[in-house]
């Protein structure tokens, strides 16, 4: 696959309507210097010099889709709080159309990372599962948004926002829309019928167990794909690249990372790239090498980052 692979689909991607649904969060970063150890406990003291905020989770998927030029809508649940308002404002600034349900009883998920000398020293999570009433309202909105979309990405971070994912996949199939799932946990029966599921290596191992050879890996992957009635299964394998399994067989693509700086959000970039390209009408065999290239670029950036058409 040549480096101009994305260029062939660039105009079609601009016309593609991508719907992203899932768990969102606000990623906060505190950067500083470490010059001494605390006298209170054997931990470093970080003198914070600057802070950053970025959309995380499904919000990062959406901003990646928008960065590639796709017309991207995000459907999710946030709290009626400062973090939720900040997240919406940032999404709009990055070209995403947010459709956010606000739950007054739900604090927006926030992940605070403390960085000293470019090393993550600590992460603090603030999160609560959304209420069933809010999720039911989101499901009603989903049907209309899905009908107006060319591709749907369901980004499962295990925070409760995709409690109705089986119904969402069924709806997408009835509409004839490709539906891509970034999975979480070991209950994958609820992803049955999806067009594409994109686990990383450890998520895949959690479901199928260990393997002792590439042949056994291929067999387990294809058995899982057929058991779940998936059109395709894509396993991202870090330094080993990506492996795509369809009814036509297996396609193994070597990794393209030149320098791995931070793998945070790399899976978000992969599934957003795939969603944008499939929404543009690209065959999956064309989309996966481009997503692999995007992953190789984004791991060279700190934190939840995006890849642009010019990067590709």
Image (cartoon, grey):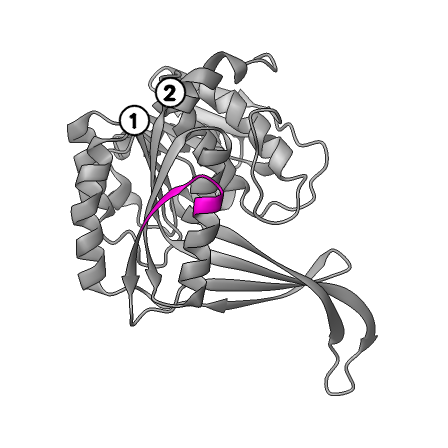
User: In percent of the image, x 45 and y 39: which residue is there?
Assistant: 95
**Looking at the rendering, which quadrant does residue 306 occupy?**
top right
Residue annotated with mark 1:
150
In the depicted structure, whether residue 139 falls above or below residue 238: below
Q: Is residue 173 left or right of residue 241?
A: left
Mark 2 or mark 1, earlier in chain:
1
Q: Position of residue 278 (x, y in %)?
A: 37, 23
Residue that protrudes farthest toward the right in the picture: 35
x then y, percent, for residue 311: 62, 27
Which element type, helix, strand or loop, lies under badge 2?
loop
Point out the image quarter for the C terminus. Answer: top right
Identity of the residue drawn at 75% across and 71% down: 47
Residue 126: give x, y in percent of width and height.
Answer: 46, 69
Front residue of 272 and 69: 69
Residue drawn where x is 23% and y is 38% of the image: 145
Mark 2–mark 1 CB contact (< 8 Å): yes
Q: CA distance from mark 2 to mark 1?
A: 7 Å
Tell me which segment is drawn in magenta: 92-99
Q: Quadrant of the N terminus?
A: top right
Residue 266, position as x, y percentages in the image: 55, 41
Question: Is 85 displayed left or right of 151 in the figure?
Answer: right
Other residues around mark 2 within 10 Å, as few (<14) / some (14–19) / many (≥20): many
Is residue 95 covered in magenta?
yes
Residue 46 visible, this orientation = yes
208 or 32, nearer to the observer: 32
Q: Crowding near pointer 1: few (<14 within 10 Å), some, many (20+)?
A: many
Where is 13 relative to 206, above or below?
above
Q: Residue 280 has which mark?
A: 2
Indicate whether residue 54 is drawn in magenta.
no
């Amino acid at each position: 696959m040549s480096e101009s692979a994305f260029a062939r689909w660039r105009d079609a991607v601009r016309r593609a309507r991508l719907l992203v649904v899932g768990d969102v969060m606000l990623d906060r970063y505190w950067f500083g210097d470490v010059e001494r150890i605390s006298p209170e406990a054997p931990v470093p003291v970080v003198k914070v010099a600057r802070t950053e905020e970025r959309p995380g989770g499904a919000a990062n998927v959406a901003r990646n889709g928008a960065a590639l030029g796709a017309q991207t809508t995000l459907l999710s649940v946030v709290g009626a709080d400062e973090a939720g308002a900040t997240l919406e404002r940032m999404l709009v600034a990055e070209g995403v159309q947010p459709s956010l349900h606000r739950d007054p009883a739900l604090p927006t998920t926030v992940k605070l990372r403390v960085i000293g000398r470019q090393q993550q020293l600590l992460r603090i999570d603030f999160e609560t599962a959304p209420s069933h009433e809010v999720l039911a309202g989101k499901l009603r909105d989903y049907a209309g948004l899905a009908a107006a979309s060319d591709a749907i990405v369901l980004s499962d971070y295990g925070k409760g926002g995709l409690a109705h994912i089986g119904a969402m996949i069924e709806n997408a199939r009835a509409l004839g829309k490709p539906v891509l799932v970034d999975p979480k946990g070991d209950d994958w029966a609820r992803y049955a019928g999806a067009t594409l599921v994109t686990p990383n290596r450890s998520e895949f191992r959690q479901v199928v167990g260990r393997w002792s050879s590439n042949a056994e890996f291929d067999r387990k992957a294809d058995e899982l794909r057929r058991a779940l009635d998936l059109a395709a299964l894509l396993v991202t394998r870090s330094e080993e690249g990506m492996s795509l399994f369809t009814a036509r067989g297996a396609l193994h693509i070597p990794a393209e990372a030149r320098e791995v700086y931070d793998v945070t959000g790399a899976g978000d970039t992969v599934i957003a790239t795939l969603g944008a390209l499939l929404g543009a009408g690209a065959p999956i065999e064309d989309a996966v090498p481009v997503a692999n290239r995007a992953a190789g670029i984004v791991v060279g950036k700190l934190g939840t980052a995006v890849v642009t058409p010019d990067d590709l």
